[in-house]
Image (cartoon, rainbow, N blue to C red):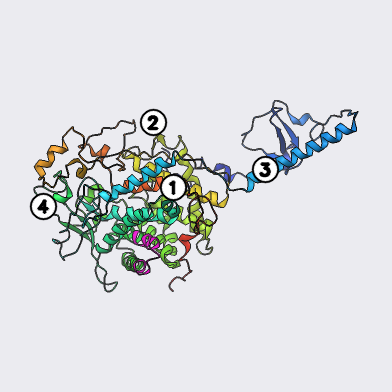
Amino acid sequence: MVNSIGSPTHTSASTHADRNYSSGIDHQPVRFVHTISEAGRLLPSASQWSSIELDFHLAPQPNTTYDSLPSQYSKSFDYELVITDKKYFKRFVSVSIFILLVILAIVLLVQFLPHTHKHHGNPKNITLALNQALMFFDAQKSGNYPSNSPVIFRGSSGLQDGNTSNPHADLKGGFYDSGKNIKFSFPTAYTITLLSWTVIEYHDKYGSIGELDHVKDIIRWGSDYLLKIFDHPNSTTSPIIIYSQVGSNHTSGYNDVTCWQRPEDMNYLRPVSACNETASDLAGEIVAALSAASIVFKEDTGYSVKLIQSAEKLFEVATKNDTGHHQGTYTAVEDCGGEARTYYNSSGYQDELIWGGTWLFFATGNTSYLGYATGNFNAAEGEETASEEGVFYWNNKLTANAVLLTRLRYFHDLGYPYEVGLGSSSKKIDLLICSYLSHKIYNRTPGGLIVLRPDHGEPLQFAATASFLGKLYSDYLELLRRSGVSCSGLSNCLTVPYFLRAASIPWDDQHYSCPEGDRWLYSKDPNPNILWGAMVAGPDKFDNFLDDRDKPWFTEPTIASNAGLVAALIALHDPPPYKSSDSNDNNLGIDLTGIFENLQLVPPAT
């Protein structure tokens, strides 16, 4: 893989943009040429406006040199034309004019009528896949389980979560992260941010297939939990506690990692891990999630305001001391993490803080947050590791943030003093997005799956978010009617059903202990319950895949990876057959201006 995609040293995709087309005009006797495909040759022309401009030797080179021609103009030949019957000649002229008018009408219709779009597979199949992908989050819910859930083999669980924390906290709710019954705050916040983004952009699509209320219920389940996991300080000088994890933490005996058990049967100790405000990446992601969710629930004014106020308080505390940040969510305080140090050990914090600032700007319209995001974007780029450039997932938000800032520049440009930051973001995205299609930059498995992080594994989550960003950016370009950039063909994510721990144990009103759960962990029999729609980690770079419960590096899904799957599916879904009041007269199923409704240009604080 070529490193530094979109960086100043990566010139393969941008060299042509920097070429000086005007140089050397006086030294070339023939600058412009006509092309006549039927003749298979190039004819010289003196007019720039009736010709194409050649450079870089991209067009076939003719065998004949034009220096020997007597002039710059195309050679002409005189033919004698004798009209023997004026009646037939007039008829010929009339028919020719009519044909030309028909052709002109067709050209105009093609140019000005709404563009049709290729179907991304059977729309019914994508609708079903999307419904099932959302059901995964229903199956991962912790707390008082809703009676109307479509997943019938789940019930209430984790009702004592937070009782052992000091101080005591109500941490019921949220989502179990994967097959393990642990609740991690960092990927939960990322999941809510990403799902909220898909609703903000594509709520028309969700509504047309009857899934809008479903996805909003999932988002609210997560945002309600995020409001619980940090204490709101009375002042910016008061310490803040952010609960980063519930469960496991390597306790002796059975725990969420060593016990194969349904969440409803848990009776072991579930400790709580806590961080402070110096866990800047965790704080930044929570800010992003609450801010994005506030836009989703804008019609519920009271709840939306509550989300915004909480996000603003946390952002203020997290950014007040530039020297007090910690790189890595789980290095801030001694007990901040547990298993999260292994599974979700963030490599930096700058990308989460500008991610939070960007979403807080869209939620409030306060340009001081945009100023923070654009002012620190270069610092975040400097923190990005080479192996993660161009990758969007729970640990790296930089590419997605650049897409958001590019959206702002394209459709609601604020100009000075943000034009430099917005411009650098759009340049980064112009170079990056379609590089996903380049086999020279990113490798593929034998089956064609893009491998964005060849040394990491779990390729499906990265391919899914690449599909989402590529299709979303392509929609932006379509709205702008910009040509020259095509990002189609990015639907290379893969939906694979995976059977969860709760699905592998019978739902028969019987309590099964940890030792009894091992019976199903190592069983070769089919699962008694099946949950479709969970995206597994995926194959290795050679397309090898082992569908075994005890090989999680192949088979374990997570809420973060499934959020990417949902994002890709809704982006690739066909637009609704109608235009809603929010479609802004486009037929892409995207809300062009909804994300900008709160941009009242609140001036930055002085």
Nearest-to-viewer mark from 1 and 2: 1
Which stretch is magenta? 289-305
In terms of sequence position, does the residue under pointer 3 or pointer 2 come before the other? 3
**Camera-side residue: 7 or 170?**
170
Q: Callout 1: few (<14), some (14-19), or many (20+) C-alpha neighbours within 10 Å?
A: many
Q: Position of residue 7 (x, y in %)?
A: 46, 47
Residue 589 among those drawn in magenta: no
> Do the numbered discs 4 and 2 sit on residues whose CB atoms are within 8 Å?
no
Marks 3 and 1, the one that precedes in the sequence: 3
- Circle number at residue 267: 4
What numbered label is drawn on residue 447?
2
- The picture places residue 2, in percent across and down from the top left corner, at 43, 39
Q: Quadrant of the N terminus?
A: top left
Whether residue 413 is visible: yes
Dots 3, 2 in contact, CB < 8 A: no
- Is tag 1's residue or tag 2's residue first in the polypeptide sequence? 2
What amino acid is at disc 2? Gly
Which residue is depicted at the point 29% across and 41% down?
532
Choose the circle earlier in sequence order: 4 or 1.
Answer: 4
Please, what secondary structure does the residue beneath circle 2 have?
A: loop
Q: Which residue is mark 1?
A: 571
Report the disc number at residue 559.
Answer: none
Q: CA distance from mark 1 to mark 2?
A: 23 Å
The amino acid type of the residue labelled 4 equals Asn
Q: Residues within 10 Å of mark 2 (few under 14, many from 20)?
A: few
Q: What residue does disc 3 label?
A: 107
Quote the CA–CA distance across marks 4 and 3: 71 Å
